[in-house]
Image (cartoon, coloured by chain):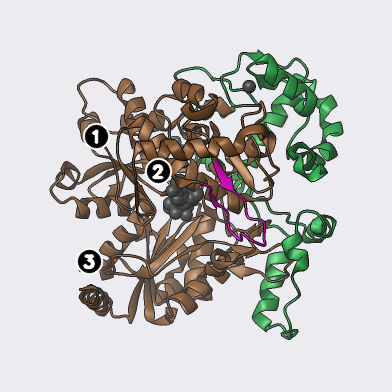
Amino acid sequence: MEDDNPLSRQSSRIRKIAPKLSAALLDPNTRLQVAQARLDALENDGVALDTAEADEDEDAFAGDEDLGFSQKKAPKGSKRKTRQAKALERLGNTKKAPRTFLEMLHETNLEALPAHVPSYLTAAVGPPNSGSRRHFCSVCGYLSTYTCPRCGARFCSSQCQIVHNDTRCQKFVA
Amino acid sequence: MERSVAAAEAEAAATAAAAVGVEKIVVLDNGAGFCKAGFAGHQDPVAMVPNCLGRPRGSKRWLVADQVQECDDIQGLAVRRPMDRGYLISPELEKEVWDRIFKVLLNVKPADCALLLVEPLFNLPSIQKITDELVFEDLGFHSYYVADAPSLAHIYEANRRPESLLARSDCSLIVDSGFSFTHAVPVFQKFTMNYAVKRLNLGGKALTNYLKELVSYRAWNMMDETYLMEDVKEKLCFCSTDVPFDLNVSRKRGNSNYIKCQYVLPDGVKYKRGFVKDPGAAAAVHLKKKNVEIEVNGKHIDEDNVRTRVDTDRASVGTTETRRNVIVVDEQELTLTNERFMVPEMLFHPADLGMEEAGLAECIVRAVSACHPDLQALFYSSVVLTGGSMLFPWCKEKLELELRPLIPDEFDVHVTLTDSPITACWRGGSLLAASPDFGDCLVSKRDYEEQGSLRCRRRFFH
Ligand SMILES: Nc1ncnc2c1ncn2[C@@H]1O[C@H](COP(=O)(O)OP(=O)(O)OP(=O)(O)O)[C@@H](O)[C@H]1O
Ligand SMILES: [Mg+2]
Ligand SMILES: [Zn+2]
Ligand SMILES: [Zn+2]
């Protein structure tokens, strides 16, 4: 059964993005950008803000991975929505994303304050003093000693290198 | 017994409200992750609900706050949050959450209530303005007061341990690690020393997303399952006090790998929610580390018992084991090993991830070092951990280990995890709002209408 193979399931998403990235990853500058994008992603809500697109995705997946949903019937009766529910729907689905905090921060121009005035900027902890960066294997999480020459990913052993080359090299989860 | 506690609380709440001349005093810790809301004078908040709207996959209907929490369709749940990086960015979304909290969960009329609102440190003036509008114009509160989380956590801790050095010196170093960020904050005589505050841009949200990323890269694609991964994180992650050692354990095969454990993923049919497959096996890590006895689901477990359970587990894994560290036993199971401690590790060493930020221990040292030298000993002897992300087992122990070498020998270091990290701040707010002179601090709707947001704001700070 195809679906029993975890790799087949995870790879659908990866393949979509890989071609664009693989070339870019060869360049150390873009590698840095990719690393930054990855850090920024840690603040994501994991929401597709564009709901139209999200709906298409749902249809595409309903067959294989969302059995629970597709078996369910639409709620009976209650076709008439309350006004509040409608307002909520509009609010939730609005494509206009609110301004982000970083945009609002930028507009506030805290840089113009004298250095002794405490602000969001002065409170930032700043770069580390001590210790250097430790590296961990991207495949298994163990301490790593090797770096992939093609994509810069880390691995710890020849076993993990094989896994990396076979399935993950130059592929990204976004 | 319980009845009398409730009665005493109700009385305290009524007295406090009467002193201010309102029907009720509402206390709201508006965390980016969770809103905690209730009445001044109570021990605990009435409502603790996600500060977001959520829409189940395939549904058109958006759920609000507690409805999101109760929803059974958590797979692929879409979420919209009024807060970004800890700060309010969408008053429209926040209004929906607050309406739900005040009108349904607390069942109060804002016009008859005073509000104590907890706001993030260094809130931007533009955000303060939209917050004031929300409070007075959209909800129409009678009056309000703004406090920050660390000073309230300090009030709570001082009240909880009246004999402690912390209470006697009225001085502490509060570490608040919630959903969006982590702050190290010296509090002196109930005031936050804001020039010394240090912030690490990491909190529970980033940790959950990191776990999600690791798992998606190594096993299943969980990128759309934030909600689920948050549960995995809260149930299975812990802080390692010896990373190289635990890394070795976690790559062993068989019995000696007491870190590896499974989480059963919901399938939407049989299991609506995910759960830890074998809590005994998951807890084995506690027994190996420290020889303490623990209880899981009220059942007493001793070490042998855990071993046999781990054995049976191994047997069932058997052939499906692959060379990868995260293995998938069948469609519904997720196996975790070193992810369990490498995720919280990020709070202590963000540099490992490529973040240009000092870790938690250094963050504390920098905050204390920015204070007057005469006070530094007091801060180090009263470090208090609060916020949901301090709930990882061994967080305090790990922090003590990492802190000690960074601090001169002549200072004592004493770290305490408060007894209720998620509600400590709310509880402090409840105490403050029920204190006799709380009324003097309030800004009324009329003040606001006459003087505007900016002038009123000045009153909140010393
Ligand atoms: N047992 C646990 N172990 C680890 N983390 C936990 C645990 N319980 C809750 N958390 C995390 O704590 C966070 C919520 O904490 P808290 O309620 O203190 O934050 P908040 O006040 O909403 O956010 P902020 O203060 O950043 O605005 C969530 O990210 C949640 O995943
Ligand atoms: Mg908080
Ligand atoms: Zn490896
Ligand atoms: Zn590679």
In this picture, is B445 found above or below A145? below
Disc 1 marks which amino acid? Answer: His
The chain in green: A
Left or right: where B351 falls relative to B405: right
Q: Position of residue B142 (x, y in %)?
A: 39, 77
* Among the two numbered marks 3 and 2 on one chain, the one whose residue lies closer to the N terminus: 2
- Mark 2: amino acid: Met
**Residue A97 seen in the figure:** yes
Residue B32 higher or lower than B293, as above or below: below
Q: Residue at label 1? A: B414
In what quadrant of the picture does the N terminus of chain B appear?
Answer: bottom left
Tell me which chain appears brown: B
- Chain ID at mark 1: B
- Identify the residue at horizontal 48%, vertical 25% (top origin): B249
Height in image: A18 above or below B98?
above
Residue B435 is left or right of residue A32, and the answer is: left
Q: Nearer the viewer, residue A15 or B48?
A: A15
**Region in magenta:** B262-277
Question: What subunit carries mark 3?
Answer: B
Relative side of A19 to B46, left or right: right
**Residue assigned mark 2:** B390
